[in-house]
Amino acid sequence: MAVGTSLLVTVGALSLVGTVMVKELGAVRRGAPGRSLRVLAMMLIVLVMAASLTFFLLDEIRPDEITGLDTRTDALYFTLSTMTTVGYGDVHAEGQIARVLVCVLIVFNIVVVASLVRSQTRSPTPPTPPKR
């Protein structure tokens, strides 16, 4: 029961971090000043930690969902290989719940995280010269 509660809290935290990152992306796209690179890096670290913990707790509740995931390090490894779209295959989603979570993480990573990183690394557009 405690693992199930931990999983719900972790998924809630993951949703909160995701919501903040989506709002940040919307603000950046509207031209508002974005958060500092430090804040975005911290949000990314929290996202990785929460996703790793989610996969670990899911494996605790339903061991057949993710093959090869036995430790927290395995969960971190699986999260990072999924987010970077490397996917070696030694740890992989077998069950439908795990596959849905992986799909959500991949889409979120491609759309939100990649866009935020791009917005932070893009050189600012030079000001347009005044018209005469």
Image (spheres, rainbow, N blue to C red):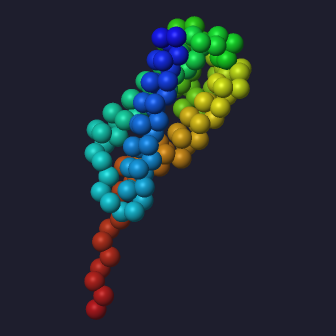
- Side of 10 where 78 appears, left or right: right
Query: Relative to the observer, which residue lies in front, 119 or 47?
Result: 47
* Residue 101 horizontal/vertical position (percent): 60, 30
Residue 59 figure quarter: top right
Residue plotted at (38% across, 56% down): 27
Residue 97 visible in the picture:
yes
* Residue 81 horizontal/vertical position (percent): 56, 26
Residue 75 visible in the picture:
no
- Image quadrant in which the C terminus is located: bottom left
State the count of labels.
Answer: 0
- Side of 47 where 70 appears, left or right: right
Query: Relative to the observer, which residue lies in front, 74 or 58?
Result: 58
Residue at far top of view: 70
Residue 102 figure quarter: top right
Residue at far front of view: 1
* Residue 80 horizontal/vertical position (percent): 52, 26
> Is 13 above or below relative to 124?
above
* Residue 52 horizontal/vertical position (percent): 49, 21
Query: Relative to the observer, which residue lies in front, 51 or 85?
Result: 51
Residue 97 figure quarter: top right
Residue plotted at (28% across, 45% down): 36
> Is 52 above or below relative to 73?
below
Residue plotted at (29% across, 79% down): 129
Residue plotted at (30% across, 57% down): 33
